[in-house]
Amino acid sequence: MPEPIMDSFAPPSKQPEPKQGIWGIAAYVGGKSKIDGVAEPVKLSSNENAFGCSPKAAAAFTEASAKLFRYPDGHAGPLRAAVAAYHGLEAERLVFGNGSDEVFGLLNQTWLEVGDNIVTGEHGFLAYRISAEACQAEVRLAAEPEQRVEIDRLLDLVDAKTKIVYLSNPANPTGTWNTPDEIADLRRRLDPAILLVIDEAYAEFADVPSYESAFGLARSHDNMIVTRTFSKIHGLAGLRVGFGYCPVRVIEAMERIRMPFNVNLPAQYAAVAALSDQAHIDASKDQVVEWRPRFYQAVRALGYRIDQSLGNFVLIYFKDEAQAARANEHLMQKGFIIRHVANYGLPQALRVTIGKDHENEGFLAALSEFAG
Ligand SMILES: *Cc1c(COP(=O)(O)O)cnc(C)c1O
């Protein structure tokens, strides 16, 4: 065995050190996908589409396999045109990302300097926070007394160093939402030099008149951004496509640092096809809209708190963290993988994605067994 090369002058502790703040970031822990001893667990932990993606998207993905030696369209031309047409948006105001996660990352990288801050809800999505911390920015979390973002509390945390306010609407993991009046109020009271990002990853599952997309409001304001994803209703989480609808100047700034081929070729093909399958989109929404109230009723009958959710998931509150952990353990033994959302500041709660009929029935039966 060769002798290790030692520099006798260097202190033994000398090694490459990442920049300030990196060790302080809690690494993202995703949903589990396996249970020891269970051959085919039912995975209801990541808000994926119970029906998978559209067969049209799968066919487009296969078709793309003949073109894998080509670089993708760096401008995502056909996808840009399809999204603009589907949502009635100006094509030049769209930026595409490797999932909406990358859009948040691009925004943070473009706007945040050391010592700046972002403001979001206390139970807000972790992706905003991780990339902000990587920019050595401070993450300010507004209390959500009823597990719902309150506009006044967000604004209370805004100061001269605030560059971006992130609001997920509907919110994950709480499933709660803010009304169009509240969003308009937030926009009005926020300094126009601060970006307001409305993350609408679950917008397609909303079915109440008190919820509205912010696309309309964003159209006429120079500091508003609305993001969407193909990971949820379109069932393309594995391909990673999301986009932001932004003011032109925001696009121009982000385009300077966006890697040219950030959205891969099969992802672009499949996403275009997904938008052409309205029947699959409708069926995916109908499944969620039909099952949410059945979850409310069944879970409340067992004595647990569950609130109305506008997402493709529900959040079940237990007495305390220990009971939530025991319920989680029982459900795992029964083959159901769900999400204990302690890392979202809700240690007493479990988040469950709405699945197929037999999966939902099986889950509720296993929960009922736990409740005894
Ligand atoms: C799932 C989810 C997204 C989507 O992330 P992608 O990177 O597009 O997969 C965005 N925001 C929230 C709140 C989510 O739960």
Image (spheres, helix red, strand yellow):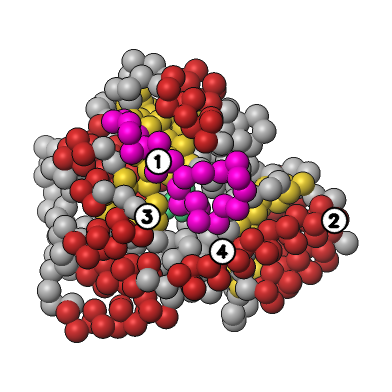
Using a 10 Å C-alpha cutoff, classify the residue at mark 3 as few (fewer than 14 neighbours), some (14 to 19) or many (20 or more): few
Quadrant containing the N terminus is bottom left
Residue 2, percent from left and from top: 14, 65
Mark 2 or mark 1: name the one nearer the start of the chain.
1
Query: Gap between marks 4 and 1, in whole Å?
Result: 22 Å
Q: Is residue 290 above or below residue 180?
A: below
The residue labelled by disc 4 is 285
Query: Gap between marks 3 and 4, in whole Å?
Result: 17 Å
**Amino acid found under the numbered disc labelled 2:** Leu
User: Does residue 348 show up?
Assistant: yes
**Residues marked 4 and 1 touching at CB (< 8 Å):** no
Query: Gap between marks 3 and 1, in whole Å?
Result: 11 Å
**Mark 4 vs ligand 1: CB below 8 Å:** no
**Amino acid found under the numbered disc labelled 1:** Gly
**Residues marked 3 and 1 touching at CB (< 8 Å):** no
Q: Main secondary structure of the magenta part?
A: loop
Using a 10 Å C-alpha cutoff, classify the residue at mark 2 as few (fewer than 14 neighbours), some (14 to 19) or many (20 or more): some
**Is 327 displayed left or right of 286 in the figure?**
right
Q: Nearer the viewer, mark 2 or mark 3?
A: 3
The residue labelled by disc 3 is 87
Mark 3 or mark 4: name the one nearer the start of the chain.
3
**Amino acid found under the numbered disc labelled 4:** Lys
The residue labelled by disc 2 is 302
Secondary structure beneath dot 4 equals helix
**Amino acid found under the numbered disc labelled 3:** His
Instruction: Tell me what residue is drawn at x 49 percent, y 25 percent.
Output: 185
Using a 10 Å C-alpha cutoff, classify the residue at mark 4 as few (fewer than 14 neighbours), some (14 to 19) or many (20 or more): some
- Residue 205 or residue 15, whichever sits in front: 205
The residue labelled by disc 1 is 216
Instruction: Tell me what residue is drawn at x 26 percent, y 67 percent.
Output: 268
**Is 309 displayed left or right of 305 in the figure?**
left
Query: Gap between marks 2 and 1, in whole Å?
Result: 41 Å
